[in-house]
Image (tube, helix red, strand yellow):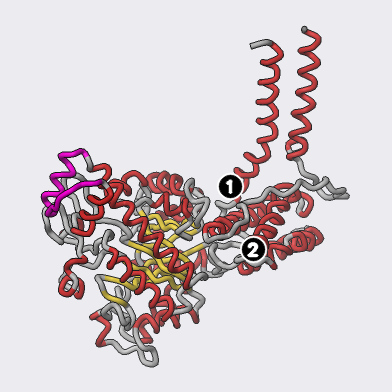
Amino acid sequence: MTEFTKFLAVSALLVCLLTGVVTMSFDKEIAFASQSADGVGVVSARGVWHRPDDTGTEKDVAGVCAFLDKLQRAGVNLVFLETFYHGMAMYRSTLVPYYTKFQSYNYGEYADYMSCFVAEADKRGIEVHAWVEDFYIGIEENYFTKNLPEWLLVTDKGSTRNTEGGGYIFLDPANAEVKNYLVSFYDELLTAFPTVAGLNLDYIRYPVSDQGDDTGYTQAAITAFCGQNNIDGSFTATEFAAYVKKNGLYSAWVDFRAAQVTDFVRTVFRSVRTKHPDKLLSTAIFPEPSLSYNTKKQDFGKWIEKGYIDIVTPMAYYDNPDTLKNALAEMSADCDKCFCYAGLSATYHNLSNAAVTRQLEVCNETGMDGFVFFGAKSLVENDNYVELLHKRFGTVSSVTPHATVGKLYEATVTPLADYLDKNGDGDGADELVAALDKLKTCNEYDAESLAEGVKALRLVVKYNLSQYVSEQNLDVTKQCLGKLYRFVSVKQSRLEARGGSQPVDPEPTPPVEPDNGNKDTDKKGCFGTVGASGLALVMLLAAYSVATKKR
């Protein structure tokens, strides 16, 4: 390589590094800013999973109201209400039997338990999602075991009882009739309860298993797998298990079953998108991707990448804060296309108030968009927990990150403007509000409109922040707008996944640096986009001049 060629290579690298500084810096700033959950304009999910009448007190309207009052005091703004449990529904469905326990309960003017819970939660500003245990239908004989035995999952030993849970019974994810039935049930559910915000897909998997103790050996699955792999013959469950192992097909068998689960997620997504486009899909997953894939046949990384899921709730049920932090940090890195609410078990495991507080801090430190406690019973039955959360969240905005852009704007920009006005940046606050006007008025279901709103926000945060606020208010402003940017960017990714054509995160044209008068100016100087390029060019020319003289 000649000296001049070396010079060109080094110079090109220099230009790339310098012009890349601003992008790297901006992304890190946004990531850091979005971790703050305290202060002005707080938006976060503060949720619980709730098994109906788990406390034994929800036998009537008064009991349901008392339970919800406890959640409201704790600052909870989101409930994943168990709606399909042990093969039964929490409302009077035409497809699924009504929960046996509730048949003797009286909910007054309401038709059933779920009608009561959803209506009363709405009065308290608590958002309800239907938590459904897709393929898991319990451990006891029920409607499905008695009437539809061909729908049940079968182990490699030929049993419908799986090792997990001491005999869990599952429906077969490879059975088309099962998938269609569940999709129809979910459609009925969302139609019957228009204020329910979406579905929380749980047990969206096979039972925990491995090559030595396996499951999924139904005739529907065996027939489909053999057809895909040109295998002739008929097999019993035990015969096929032996055949797969003998012929080195176990890895392909794992992939096949994972594909069945992904196909169901995709089918639910398409059904909801078509019939209930304003509803959200969330899923309860285990935070270890490789382990989840091999033992539970969950390929949740693909679900996120394909845009099927709006919210993931990784079940990070760890008591040790360092272990929790590592698990959530890994999940956070994969959640650029969806919201991520950490699933916590601190109250379920009866940890101290200090330990609960530390887990909430870990959620902030790892960039989680919120948290969900498992379960509600352990929270509401412990007044110490209720009061701890009340002091932390009871007076804070209840807007969730997945709320509409308009609500996010009002919960973030409006209080931020008030804060700036009270802290010496009144003029800047007015200008900031004007600069973000496109965000306030954008239609989040229209790709072009949302893109314009995101572009306006990015322009303010990336280039012009110091134009609006003084140094003393810069960190607070970054925290608020950093979170807002994260949330609307996810919405943009979600819209694209649902069929929008606008590219995600369009890069705005850098503005000409304005004359800010006495206002503080951007201290980044040459490390703006244009400045970085200019500095690189100057250094390139200087290096070339030196190289020419040496030659």
Report the amino acid beneath label 1: Phe
Up-down relation of residue 143 to residue 59 (above or below): above
- Residue drawn at (43%, 63%) of the image: 269
Q: Quadrant of the N terminus?
A: top right
The answer to which image quadrant residue 266 occupies is: bottom left
71 versus 481 height, above or below = below
- Residue 412's disc is 2
Q: Which residue is mark 1?
A: 32
**Rendered position, 191 above or below 35:** below
Nearer-the-camera pick, 459 or 160: 160
**SS state under label 1:** helix
Query: In the structure shown, which secondary structural element does the residue marked by tag 2 occupy?
Result: helix
Q: Foreground residue, 151 or 319?
A: 151
Give residue 251's position: percent from left, percent from top. 26, 42
Image spot of residue 356 (x, y percent): 41, 57
Count the numbered circles shown: 2
Q: Amino acid at mark 2?
A: Thr
Q: Tell me residue 354's x, y (percent).
A: 42, 55
**Is 28 on the left or on the right of 124, as rendered?**
right
Q: CA distance from mark 1 to mark 2?
A: 17 Å
